[in-house]
Amino acid sequence: MRQKINSQKGFTLSEMLMSVLVMLLATLIIAGGVTAVRSAYINITLKADAQTLLSTTISAMEDDLRYAQNINISNIEDGTTTVAFDSPSRGYNMYFLNDDSEGILIANTQSTATVPLVTDKAMANNLFSKFESEGAAIYNPEDNIFTLTIKVCNKKDSDKVLAEQQLSIKPINS
């Protein structure tokens, strides 16, 4: 029995503390790497979703603007300019509106009803799309061209643009 107690086999207290310290450092390094990878994944996913929303919004707006008929530019009471047009695919006179919670809306000139241009599923990760135009209107009657910039933003920080694309669309039916 005495031989087992006085035996030199095993680890000393300092060796145990050093091994615990090494394991702790390794765990911290791995945790930091996981955090960095997770952050990069979130950013990449957000940018990919923004590009998908941008592409979906461009397709939807191009479809409506390409076949626009009877294009009318009018000023609304709040000083904004609206470009309304007949949409053969939708069957009514319409115009586009920006909304920070629902993105770009399609508004019927004959009623107060609005519908989102793209579905909620296309607006993943709290993203929304909006459009802007240079000058007073998105339509230039002299050139018969719609010119606008579509931007994709995050609902939490609507000033931060994640993706954007400028469009110039010439209607084929007018």
Image: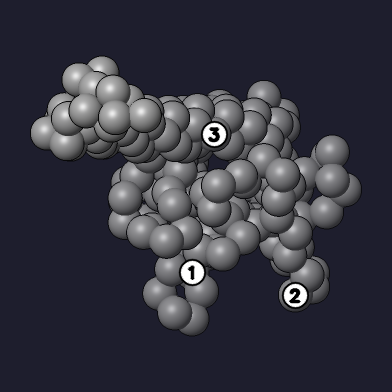
Mark 2, secondary structure of its residue:
loop
Image x and y of residue 46, in percent: 47, 37
Quadrant in the rendering for residue 20: top left
Image x and y of residue 158, in percent: 38, 58
> Which residue is drawn at the image coordinates 29% and 29% (left, top)?
2
Q: Nearer the viewer, mark 2 or mark 3?
A: 3
Residue 4 visible in this rendered orientation of the protein:
yes
Callouts 2 and 3 close, C-beta under 8 Å: no
- Residues at marks 1 and 2, CA–CA distance in whole angstroms: 17 Å
- Return the residue at label 3: 49
- Residues at marks 2 and 3, CA–CA distance in whole angstroms: 31 Å
Judge by depth and name the residue closer to the eye, 135 or 36: 36
Q: Nearer the viewer, mark 1 or mark 2?
A: 2
The 10 Å Cα crowd at callout 3, few under 14, some 14 to 19, many 20 or more, is: many
Q: Which mark is residue 112?
A: 2
- Residues at marks 1 and 3, CA–CA distance in whole angstroms: 34 Å
The 10 Å Cα crowd at callout 2, few under 14, some 14 to 19, many 20 or more, is: few
Q: Which mark is residue 75?
A: 1
Single out the residue that lies furthest toward the bottom: 77
Quadrant in the rendering for residue 95: bottom right
